[in-house]
Amino acid sequence: MMKFFNTLTRQKEEFEPAKPDKVGLYCCGPTVYNYAHIGNLRTYVFEDFLRRALEFNGYIVNHVMNITDVGHLTSDADEGEDKMKKGAEREKKTVWEIAEYYTQAFLEDMDRLNLLKPTAKPKATDHVEEMIDQIKQLEENGFTYIGENGNVYYDTSKFEHYKELGQLEKQESEAVARVEVDPNKKNPHDFVLWFVESKHGDQEMQWDSPWGRGFPGWHIECSAMSSRYLGDQFDIHCGGIDHIPVHHTNEIAQAEGASGKHPWVKYWMHGNFLVMKDKEKMAKSGENFLTIATLIQKGYDPMDYRYFCLQSHYRKELAFDWDGVDAARTGFRRLREKVMALGDTEGEIDQGYIDKFMDAISDDLNMPQALAMAWELMDDVSIKDADKLSTIKKMDTVLGLKLDEPIEFELPPQITQWILERNEARDNKDWAKADEIRDKIQESGKWIVKDGAGGTEVVPK
Ligand SMILES: [Zn+2]
């Protein structure tokens, strides 16, 4: 029996899906206006462990992740600029081009971190009709009103469960203080379901609706698309803890207000933050926005970061610094070397280890403990190599570390450029320049430069 900490009840609960062997899982996806920060990616790594742990327990998981390509303002509470528009202005592209480019970039990051592909990854712009339908349903059920600005608002005072997920009653003053006073709103927590043209006339993405031409609020997409792909009620909804008080609270209000069914989602699971250990130092060295490309540039394998995430429980804050990633990288390499040294003959799965591993992953996804089990197995001299190999491969279906595959590494574009320049310098017998470029490469990250028959070779340290 799996147990999860449910944000709704603030308790660890036994997991019982509505259907005995199938699980409906919805994960809030990226807003595709920029590269994903590794802090956001930590949440997707946690969700990947969850999906794999469920599958390890025999469930068939219907995993839906949305792609937000419209409607997300810089604040979750209807304030600030439109994120997509901001990205388009920054790069002098259309919002559609921005959406396409960063969706691809995100999927590539998922691949590099060995995250399983969701069963469905619907785009918000492909589902505006479903959003309009849900707003119409809410209107019919008496949950909406039109502000003086013409926008359609959700009247949170009409929904009795509004404050449950975020325990907003307890944190009332704090939560209200964060919400900007909008004279159009009847209650401080009310939020926009549909923005009309009058307010955002220069919005490139617009659709006709019963309330006028405009675009949807951010929250409506998740409740509309999850209902479309997973039904009126489903098992697990995930996201980062920052989504609890506004985005997920509003999603519940929309879904339950429209369908009249309670509870919409039985288990809510939230991943904690990645925090920078030395923010000031990181900012000074231009490292306040770390992406997978930053890791690659420095000579890390994105999988080093996966291992780094694995070492900490998803509900705890994870403190990031380069020493920590270095330690993870060393641990990961040592583990992979041990597995590679087992040879390739498989034997029998050691059930004792698998049981302990299963206990760990089923106990609210205790991945650090699961990883400790993998190490214990590798260091256990009483188990035959062939059996170890079969057992670790089974564990790796959850760890997702590709432990039995040789390490691949990706050369960043800058390094490739330097290699070309160095080969050219060597062809011209400009040894001083060749040495200078060699030093530049080695100082830029964890790279070693070697001179092979085909010229400069660069490998990770
Ligand atoms: Zn969402």
Image (cartoon, rainbow, N blue to C red):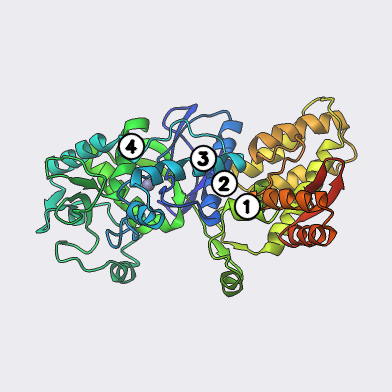
Residue on which the image places disc 2:
45
Q: Indicate which label's residue lies in the foreground, 2 or 3.
A: 3
Measure how far apart labels 2 and 4 are at the Cα level.
22 Å
Disc 4 crowd rating (10 Å Cα; few below 14, some 14-19, many 20+) is many
Measure how far apart labels 2 and 3 are at the Cα level.
13 Å
Establish if 71 lies above or below 348: below
Q: Choose the circle earlier in sequence order: 1 or 2.
A: 2
* Residue farthest along the left direction in this orientation: 148
Amino acid marked by disc 4? Met
Residue at left 40%, top 40%? Answer: 66
Residue 298 placed where, x, y %? 68, 56
Residue at left 75%, top 56%? Answer: 446
Residue on which the image places disc 1:
309
Residue 7 placed where, x, y %? 44, 52
Disc 1 crowd rating (10 Å Cα; few below 14, some 14-19, many 20+) is many
Q: Which type of secondary structure does the marked residue at label 3 adopt?
A: helix
Q: Choose the circle earlier in sequence order: 2 or 3.
A: 2
Question: For this view, does 248 lie left or right of residue 364?
Answer: left
Residue on which the image places disc 4:
225
Residue 200 placed where, x, y %? 20, 55
Amino acid marked by disc 2? Val
Any part of residue 307 in sight: no
Measure how far apart labels 1 and 2 are at the Cα level.
7 Å
Contact between labelled residues 4 and 2, with CB atoms less than 8 Å apart: no
Measure how far apart labels 4 and 1 are at the Cα level.
29 Å
* Residue farthest along the right direction in this orientation: 381
Q: Which type of secondary structure does the marked residue at label 1 adopt?
A: helix
